[in-house]
Image (tube, helix red, strand yellow):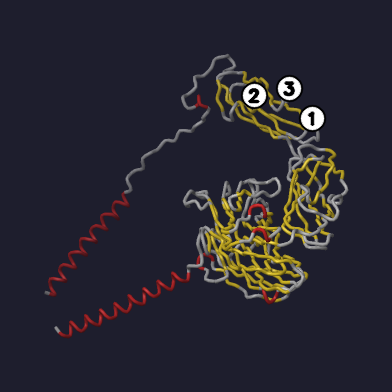
Amino acid sequence: MKQFHNDNKKIARIFLSCAVIAVLLLLSVNMAIADYEFDGFPKTDELEEVEQGSVKGGVYIDGGHGVGLSPYTQSFNVPEGEVKWARLYVGVWGGKKENTGSVAVTFNDKELETLELEGEADTNSNVYCSSHGVYWIYYDVTDNTTSGPIDAVVTTSGEIDGRMYGVVLVAVYEESDGEEVEYWINDGNVNLHGEGWSGEYATNDEALAEFAGTVDVDTFAAARLTVVYLTGTPGLNDYLYFNDEKLCDGDNCDDIANSKQSFDIKTFDVIDYIEKEANKATFELGDEDYVHPVLAVLSLHTEEEGDSDLTVSNVAVPILYTGSTNTISATIENIGDDPAYGFQAALYVDSEVVSTASISSLAVDRNKTVDFTWKPDREGEHVLWVYADYNDKKAELCEINNNNTPLTVNVIDFTPPEIEIDLPEDGEIVDTDVITVSGTIEDTSKNISVLVNGAPVILSGKKWSAPVSLYYGYNKIIVNAVDGANNSATEFVLVKSLVHPSGESESIPLEESKGIIDTAMTVVKAPVDKIGRLFFGLGVLIIIVSIAAVYWWRKRLK
């Protein structure tokens, strides 16, 4: 009996030791996977303060340039001065939260640490991962940031999608004759989203960036808020507020994260909204499916913005087509004495603004290329030009050199007409030998003709209709359209007529009267599978024999 108790004690000790080890392993695993959160990391509803202070100099913030393949290069131009603090940010698309890979960065000709990206299992302290594998990664580059031109080159590999959203540099610099600047730098990777296409997620629709501390509002002449978003979608509303005041990007107040390249960096003048304490920016989801605010920088300046001079040095126009979204590029240059912050350029066509582009900052003697989109609604000649600072927000050395010489361009119509047949429905069954066919036509050309079964019809605006005689049985009704540029399109429907040549009509079955042509399926019961039944009987017999054998063996042991 004593030996029995000793054995039990040994077993208990072994069990307890295993339980402790298991608990420790579970705790270590939980710690290892804590660096990912679907709704956002490090916080699900806030961009956290990572640096705050004051400097006699400035805060340089620049980046770009939208979704691109690896290797990805972004250029910067840091102002003169001694860099006191600097972070380089890289946005990477993983494709899925389970995907893994690596990212390697060369900044100012120095190779930074290569990181292994582990998605939902990531443990890198400088990697913020959220959503379905959206990465916002930062590097401390204080010791490697110098004045003047700098390039960052990012290379990705592995299972991850690997495309970059953009690269951003934030640098606090000091210069002996600079102005006094107070600043707050907040970062993170908040995933603002709705319920998702599957409806399985709880909504996360608001995030804050709080700029703690008190402010002597009478000291400062200028205040700028710079924000960065990933994954925004043009045409889907989202909103940005500063101290509950709605901010606008030029005339756009309802779609701040609106770049077609899934990357936005924008600067706003907020001097009129600064409070003595508890300043904050609020990001609201609006109609967006997913949008990630990842950076918010507030800077207060004792001096007003200096004298810039913005010009348009080049406009690149491709072959232009009606009905298509055409991209027109323009190079904006600052030939003034001081940097320009937070302004917009616009594309004018025939004296109307058709597209705008935002520029967060432009240093002296530097240029940036921006893209405009235009979808012409007619062919022929148009006059276009690009205007820098088109809403006249900047005080410039010269105010009459903001646009290029107007260009006369020719738009080609290669878009075929769009035919819509409203009646009858395709596959419809009727008990008549004459039917009215009707529909609509869409085209950029005003000179258009429509034919139904080869016979021309009269257009009334975009609508058309024509009577068509039917034969007994199936009839193919063909609609053709040709526009003034000789682009053509064809649509057709099938209609079944039940009227015999004698003039008599068949009765229409219930389902067919609704225009549904169905094929009945006869289900024939299969004969009983005799082989299957035989195998079933054998299985039952084997089970019975096995039970009997076990019973007999146990009885003999007794």
Residue at 48%, 33% in the rendered image: 519
Q: Which of marks 2 and 1 is nearer the N terminus?
A: 2
Crowding at label 1, few (<14), some or many (≥20) Cα neighbours within 10 Å?
few
Give the alpha-carbon distance from disc 1 to disc 3, as whole Å.
12 Å
Q: Nearer the viewer, residue 421 or 510?
A: 421
Q: Residue 437 carries which label?
A: 2
Indicate whether 418 appears above or below 194. above
Give the alpha-carbon distance from disc 2 to disc 1, as whole Å.
22 Å
Crowding at label 3, few (<14), some or many (≥20) Cα neighbours within 10 Å?
few
Label 3 sits on a secondary structure element that is loop
Q: Earlier in the sequence, mark 1 or mark 3?
A: 1
Mark 2 touching mark 3, by CB under 8 A? no
Residue at 53%, 63% in the rendered image: 41
Label 2 sits on a secondary structure element that is strand
The three-letter amino acid code for the residue at tag 1 is Asn
> Which corner quadrant of the image does residue 267 belong to?
bottom right
Give the alpha-carbon distance from disc 2 to disc 3, as whole Å.
13 Å
| 232 left or right, relative to 536 | right
Q: Where is residue 23 in the image (x, y as percent from the top left)?
A: 36, 73
Q: Which residue was labeled with disc 3?
A: 458
Indicate whether 491 appears above or below 7. above
The three-letter amino acid code for the residue at tag 3 is Ile
Mark 1 touching mark 3, by CB under 8 A? no
Q: Nearer the viewer, residue 333 or 198?
A: 333
Indicate whether 40 appears above or below 433. below
> Which quadrant would the C terminus be assigned to in this image?
bottom left
> Which quadrant would the N terminus be assigned to in this image?
bottom left
